[in-house]
């Protein structure tokens, strides 16, 4: 389910990941900074960018965060996805189309934050942060792991 009540189609590789990465096997929510403090990829640029995305999602959950944090998230998501997509295209990555579709779904969810009736509500921002963090965690530990393996195998990290 999306933030606004529509369906979100998960990545095929993520559909099996129903438990939170912060609480394996429990179905609980990840603690803040779960991914900020841990390596998500053996590809340095990818790992660094993932950490910034998770840091920004943590910031959104803070009661004093404002619309500038949402804008920072949107800008960084667009930048990260563009770089990743360009890289996949340059390597003729066979999973490019599915990966791009997953990126567009996440961008749609981020963009929906700007159309909420009360985007500054602490409750809404906390729920948005949790939802997007869980979605991104499944993406990073699922479909991005497939990309990571392909890049490492290509020797062009």
Image: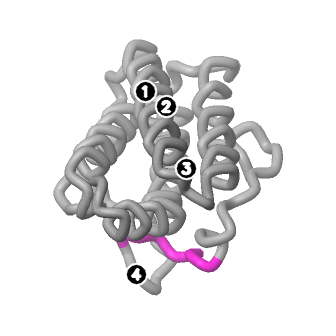
Q: Are marks 2 and 1 in contact (CB under 8 Å)?
A: yes
The residue wearing badge 1 is 79
Residue range in magenta is: 16-22
Q: Is residue 124 left or right of residue 153?
A: right
**What's the distance in space between the residues labelled 3 and 4, CA to CA?**
17 Å
Q: Determine if the magenta segment contains residue 21.
A: yes
Which is nearer the N-term, disc 4 or disc 1? 4
Q: Are marks 3 and 2 in contact (CB under 8 Å)?
A: no
**What's the distance in space between the residues labelled 4 and 1, CA to CA?**
30 Å
The residue wearing badge 2 is 82
The circle drawn on residue 131 is 3
**What's the distance in space between the residues labelled 3 and 1, CA to CA?**
21 Å
**Residue drawn at (20%, 51%), measured in percent from left and top?**
44
The circle drawn on residue 24 is 4
With respect to residue 13, does 111 lie above or below? above
Q: Nearer the viewer's eye, disc 3 or disc 2? A: 2
Q: Determine if the magenta segment contains residue 27.
A: no
């Amino acid at each position: 389910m999306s933030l606004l009540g529509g369906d979100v189609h998960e990545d095929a590789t993520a559909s099996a990941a129903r438990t939170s990465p912060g609480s394996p096997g429990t179905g609980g929510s990840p603690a803040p900074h779960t991914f900020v403090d841990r390596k998500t990829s053996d590809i340095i640029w990818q790992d660094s960018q993932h950490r910034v995305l998770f840091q920004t999602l943590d910031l959104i959950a803070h009661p004093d965060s404002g619309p500038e944090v949402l804008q920072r998230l949107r800008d960084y998501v667009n930048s990260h996805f563009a770089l990743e997509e360009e890289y996949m295209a340059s390597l003729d990555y066979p999973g490019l189309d599915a990966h791009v579709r997953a990126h567009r779904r996440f961008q749609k969810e981020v963009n929906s934050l700007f159309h909420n009736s009360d985007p500054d509500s602490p409750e809404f921002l906390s729920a948005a942060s949790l939802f997007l963090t869980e979605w991104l965690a499944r993406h990073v530990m699922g479909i991005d792991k497939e990309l990571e393996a392909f890049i490492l195998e290509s020797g062009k990290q």
